[in-house]
Image: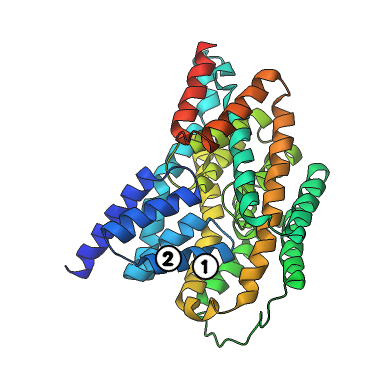
């Protein structure tokens, strides 16, 4: 096959992954393994495992970065860019459209009570995410201490700088507590600095423009870009950041609206960071249809762009970079803190959604169906929507 034919076939397979990838990064990796490794052999299983390791070491949406890295391996930077579009654009467009949901219900005199179980259901998803990460990472006293510290601090104090500070503390503490040797052995790495320069210029430029221009679209892009380079651990980890800014600080969304969007994205295929399109669109309500669509799209671009630029920066030198054990050790501490952040977010969001026996039952039922019955997320979302309509 010609190179162009290979690229077209690969993008078709990426689309199949996008339409069939439910349940977060861990489930996405299973889809990648089946479609891109076992069926089509674009990369080996060992290479896929290494790409997953790379994307867990750097900020950004890990499953998105992994499939972009596969695209880079198959066809270079241009195919990697097209891979991102094919993988992420379908669900981003859907989530942008869902930012009009509350307005649609109001215009058609439909009670928003039909969505009332989506919020507590989302808390159930968050609780399961915290449990999953904690089960893997809370294996030593230092990791348990970091979990308790991060959960305790962010339960009461959620300024924007607290989250990255705790992640850095977690990584540093785990390195200090580690008894492994030669963590920071010298490795000769020759970077192509252009992607990193773009990464920094966008960050600084967006911050500078936001400081002199009072425009909500600019604010959304800069804020979501910041989320994109501050998050290690996937879509659930970004929840406490976004909730603090969009709900508690600025009131662009209510707690119920925020949880509804996060619940709905659980039932859709593709990257969970697409929740940003819903949140950004909701933040632009009242400015008109076009600004609301732009708010959703710009927020999605903002949150995905840093992670993609970092893949472009690190992927060509991954063979050398993966030899640095210190980064892998630090990641264990970062993961323990992330579990604490998610657990704290779950408690706060449950309190905000209303402490009632029905909400409690929904949270417990959601967690039970996910953990023990292995019910697919879309079916749970559909069931909670139906329950809201019937009751």
Rendered residue at 52%/23% (across/down): 384
Q: In the image, residue 162 lies at what x, y percent?
A: 78, 54
Q: Can you say whether 386 is above or below 226 in the image?
A: above
Residue 143 quadrant? bottom right
Residue 165 at least partly seen: no
Residues at marks 2 and 1 touching, judged by CB atoms closer than 8 Å: yes
Q: Nearer the viewer, residue 222 or 118?
A: 118
Q: Is residue 346 above or below residue 209?
A: above
Where does the image place residue 250, in percent across and percent down from the top left?
73, 39
Occupied quadrant, residue 41: bottom left
Say how the picture is coloured: rainbow
The location of residue 289, given as percent across then percent down, is 50, 34
Q: Is residue 297 left or right of residue 14?
A: right
Give the residue displayed 52% in from the left and 17% down from the top.
Answer: 387
- Circle 1 packing at 10 Å, graded few (<14), some (14-19), many (20+), is many
Q: Between residues 102 and 388, which one lies in front from this camera angle? A: 388
Please, is residue 265 above or below residue 386 in the view?
Answer: below
Q: Is residue 367 left or right of 91 when viewed as pictured?
A: right
Q: Residue at (74%, 30%) from the top-left corner? A: 351
At which x and y percent is residue 224? 61, 51
Q: Secondary structure at mark 2?
A: helix
Q: Viewer-nearest of labels 2 and 1? A: 1
- State which tag comes first along the sequence, 2 or 1: 1
Could you tell me which quadrant the C terminus lies in?
Answer: top right
Tell whether 227 sits left or right of 44: right
Q: Which residue is mark 1?
A: 54
For the question of whether residue 141 can be seen, the reply is yes
Q: Is residue 150 above or below residue 345?
A: below
Q: Between marks 2 and 1, how big is the CA–CA gap?
A: 9 Å
Residue 91 sits in quarter: top left
Of residues 378 and 33, the one drawn nearer to the viewer in this rendering? 33
Question: Mark 2 = which residue?
Answer: 69
């Amino acid at each position: 096959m010609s190179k162009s034919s290979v690229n077209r076939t690969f993008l078709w397979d990426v689309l199949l992954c996008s339409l069939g990838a439910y349940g977060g990064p861990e489930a996405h990796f299973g889809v990648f393994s089946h479609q891109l490794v076992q069926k089509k052999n674009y990369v080996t299983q060992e290479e896929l495992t290494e790409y997953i390791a790379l994307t867990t070491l750097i900020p950004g949406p890990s499953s998105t970065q992994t499939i972009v890295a596969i695209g880079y391996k198959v066809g270079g930077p241009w195919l990697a860019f097209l891979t991102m579009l094919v993988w992420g654009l379908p669900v981003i467009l859907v989530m942008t459209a869902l930012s009009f949901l509350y307005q649609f219900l109001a215009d058609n005199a439909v009670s928003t009570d039909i969505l009332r179980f989506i919020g507590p259901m989302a808390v159930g998803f968050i609780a399961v995410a915290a449990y999953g990460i904690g089960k893997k990472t809370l294996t030593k006293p230092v990791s348990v201490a970091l979990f308790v510290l991060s959960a305790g601090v962010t339960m009461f104090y959620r300024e924007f700088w607290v989250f990255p500070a705790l992640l850095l503390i977690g990584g540093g503490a785990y390195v200090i507590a580690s008894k492994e040797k030669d963590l920071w052995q010298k490795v000769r790495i020759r970077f192509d600095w252009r992607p990193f320069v773009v990464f920094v210029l966008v960050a600084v430029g967006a911050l500078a423009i936001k400081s002199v221009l009072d425009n909500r679209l600019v604010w959304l892009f800069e804020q979501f870009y910041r989320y994109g380079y501050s998050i290690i651990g996937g879509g659930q980890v970004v929840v406490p950041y976004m909730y603090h800014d969009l709900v508690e600080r600025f009131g662009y969304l209510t707690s119920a609206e925020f949880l509804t969007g996060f619940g709905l994205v659980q039932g859709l295929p593709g990257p969970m960071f697409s929740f940003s399109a819903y949140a950004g669109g909701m933040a632009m309500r009242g400015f008109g249809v076009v600004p609301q669509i732009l708010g959703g799209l710009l927020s999605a671009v903002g949150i995905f762009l840093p992670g993609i630029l970092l893949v472009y920066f690190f992927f060509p030198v991954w063979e050398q970079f993966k030899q640095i054990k210190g980064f892998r050790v630090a990641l264990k501490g970062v993961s323990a803190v992330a579990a604490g952040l998610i657990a704290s977010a779950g408690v706060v969001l449950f309190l905000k959604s209303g402490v009632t026996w029905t909400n409690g039952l929904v949270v417990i039922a959601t967690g039970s169906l996910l953990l023990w019955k292995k019910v697919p997320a879309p079916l749970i979302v559909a069931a909670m929507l139906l329950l809201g309509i019937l009751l």
